Amino acid sequence: MSPASWVPPVVLEHVPDRLRRCLAGLQREDVEEIRLSAGRPLIVVGRGGDIFVTAEGELTCRQDGALAVTWELVQDTLQLMTRSSAYALEEEFRRGYLSLPGGHRVGMVGRAVLEGGRVRTLRDVAGLNIRLAREVRGAADALVAVVLGDGAPRSLLLLSPPRGGKTTVLRDLVRQVSDRGYRVGRVDEVSELAGSVNGRP
């Protein structure tokens, strides 16, 4: 991607015009997350930590110069991401996240509605955390030999802190093992590996 278009087009399609104009002009390729929280400044998270974003799409260390995220902006973004059909995404709201095409995930912050001691749904969503999926070919190079070993596939437990690259490595591992002719099955409850939504890539 060119520096002027680091946010994937599919993500830009799911945000309101005001936010789209702001994000489309950013020139930072290491961004992993976009954080929208009502009453707070717009933040992007990269390898170097959090940084604020102005309404013009410029990066700043000053909170007072950042775009102020409003309740309406969060709700408008949520409407676009759910295609105005939040009721049809009951399971996603129960889990607290949505999946966008391409494997991008959107965590939601709101009020949990409990039923029988379990979360039934999420209401009054006031924050969205957009995690950008990135393909990193070769991320699993060191693990392929471990998993395939002497030709018989082995089990692997992959652990890391949040944002440590587990999904990136696992996605590349699945690709590399499959490319070597092995039949690969995956259980992808959150649609991150295949980058699909409702079973469609």
Image (cartoon, helix red, strand yellow):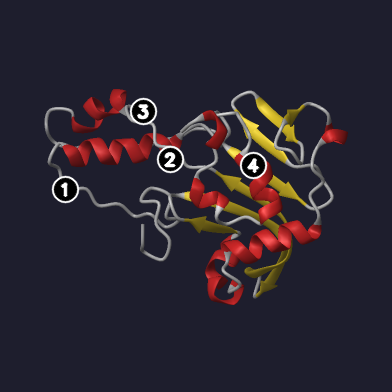
Frontmost residue, 51 versus 97: 51
Q: Which residue is identified by label 2?
A: 167
Q: Amino acid at mark 1?
A: Arg
Question: What residue is shown with label 3?
Answer: 139
Residue lying at 49% horizontally and 51% vertically, measured from the top left:
10
Q: CA distance from mark 3 to mark 1?
A: 20 Å
Q: Residue at x 76, y 41 (%)?
A: 55
Provide the secondary structure element on which disc 2 rests.
helix
The amino acid marked with disc number 3 is Ala
Choose mark 3 or mark 1, whichever is in front. 3
From the image, state whether disc 3 or disc 4 is nearer to you: 4
First reached walking from the N terminus: tag 3 or tag 2: 3
Task: Tell me the residue that label 1 is attached to.
Answer: 183
Q: Write down the residue under mark 4.
A: 23
Q: Earlier in the sequence, mark 2 or mark 1?
A: 2
- Residue 158 is situated, as x and y percent measured from the top left of the image, at 40, 35
In screen coordinates, is 30 left or right of 184?
right
